[in-house]
Amino acid sequence: MNGLKLAVAVVACGLAFSSPASDGVSDLQTAEAVDPGIYAEVAALLQREVGAQLTRHLQDQGRLRQVTVSVVVNPHKRRMIVDFGPGYLPGNDQNYGELFLIPLAGDLRRYADQAGLEILDVQFLFQGRPMEAHFPEDHPAPRAPKSRSTHTQALVSASHGYIALHPSRAWKFQRPAPLGLQEDVLSPAYGDELQGLLEQRSGLAVHRARSRSTDLHPESSHPWEQMSSRYHLKALLPERADIWNALPNSTESNREVKEDIRARPNYANHLGVDVMLSLHTNGSDASSVRGAEVYHHRAKPEDKALGDSILCGMKELIHAQPGYESFPVRAESVPDGHGENRIGRMPSVIVETAYHSNPEDVAALLDPVFRTASMKGVEKGYRLWAQGKTCEPLAGQSIVDVDIPSGESREVDVAFAGHPQFPISLVTSNTLCPPGWGCNGRTVVIDSPDQPSRMKLSCGRNSVGTLGWETHVVDADGVKTQPVPHTVRCVAVGSPDVSALARNVAGLAQ
């Protein structure tokens, strides 16, 4: 009989909703029932989805297993706990289930969102314990953090590339292209963009995990730039098989896919870089899912701040571009179990720039304007994090209203929040001009943050009246604040208003 027909996994599922006070593994221990009418549809959906996907996964591996699955949702903490009973514990040779569990987590977030539950953290347990508790030797504690101010090197890992299947040695790209966009070919250009920005703006020496050569790879006859990191590192470090040939005894067809995942962070560890930034595009069976996301490893929660800062930078830079003002960018970095982040002993995050399975995102990914803006956001988010600064959007602050004697000028401060890219421009335009007056706006360029952010306001000779202005700040990357309104009263020389102003200025000087 057909072996696959016999290899059917029997999956029993149960779902509960936890107390708001529960946390982590304790979510399973303190779960309490709620009105079943509220969550009945969610429960049925999640139960069916986890069970069906696990069944298909085990069936594809030709394994007969009876596995129980329980699901706990804590909507207050935006957390979902999926606990697999005995019979499913993916180990080292399966990259700890990464190729199955991470897409499953994405599906569960999406289904929960459709049911009105915002779930950020999908955590998988195995017989009540996280993966790292079962395999502590391959989930070591990250090294002691290095002072960010001393960072000098980064590894940029841009996507996947060709790998060979076993035993046929047929070559194939690692990622699907449902709308014709091949992530394995596209992402290296994003890596080029990010490399230049990290070198120019962050002052880092940047290493790459994949080759950018257009010469042909001898074994596959494909250009080197289309090959995965595994083969580039094999050619670069032939004596270090531990980096690129981590599973030499595996008989699985996609063995080299798993070796490629490990090769990138192994290389980062070999180089001793200070940060590893992995660039990818995302995919989903639901074509409606879109936007930018960043992932950190749940065993390295200190990397969350880096991921959050990068998302903040991406949102600011992408939204500054015409046509991308509402492009979806997730607010927080997502904890997950990617090997790239786990194996890298330095701060490591995965940037999923957009979804290659969504038509709008595909159009964005092919747009050089979006590519530059998104990578400027990644670099800015990293740089602010490395400098110990909080990423915050550029925003104008109030500008004082002033009285100015006719024929004179005054300088006023133009304050703002955020971290613009210099030079910046202070752009002032008129909103109220007395009849017969010439009221012209102006632009003042501030070359560096060491230069005072000020502009000069003037009143013409014999001019008495009130003028309205609005001023906004525009940085070198096109990020701009909302206009801030302010007024100028041009007053006659020797008027009480001017005398009061003079006294106030004298008082401030004292």
Image (cartoon, rainbow, N blue to C red):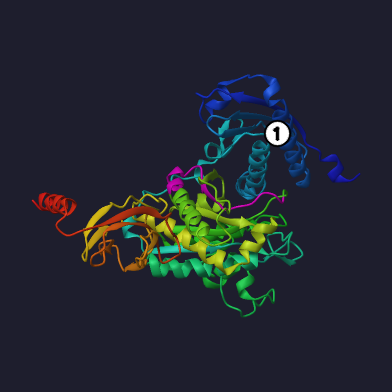
Q: How many marks?
A: 1
Question: At 60% from the left edge and 68% from the top edge, which residue is drawn?
Answer: 231
Q: Name the quarter where the N terminus is drawn.
A: top right
Rendering quarter of residue 190: bottom right
Image check: 79 left or right of 395? right
Image check: 410 left or right of 190? left
- Residue extending furthest bottom? 215
In the image, residue 181 lies at what x, y percent?
69, 64
Q: Which residue lies under the disc numbered 1?
A: 46
Residue nearer the viewer, 220 or 137: 220
Image check: 96 left or right of 489? right
Image check: 361 left or right of 508? right
How many other residues sit within 10 Å of disc 1, few (<14), some (14-19) or many (≥20)?
many
In the image, residue 27 lies at what x, y percent?
55, 26
| Amino acid under disc 1 | Leu
Residue nearer the viewer, 402 or 242: 402
In the image, residue 389 lies at what x, y percent?
35, 51
Residue interval drawn in magenta:
287-305
Residue nearer the viewer, 258 or 353: 353
332 versus 443 height, above or below: above
Rendering quarter of residue 82: top right
Element at label 1 = helix
Question: At 64% from the left edge and 76% from the top edge, which residue is drawn?
Answer: 223
In the image, residue 78 lies at what x, y percent?
55, 34
- Residue extending furthest right? 1
Residue 429 visible somewhere in the drawing:
yes
Residue 416 visible somewhere in the drawing:
no
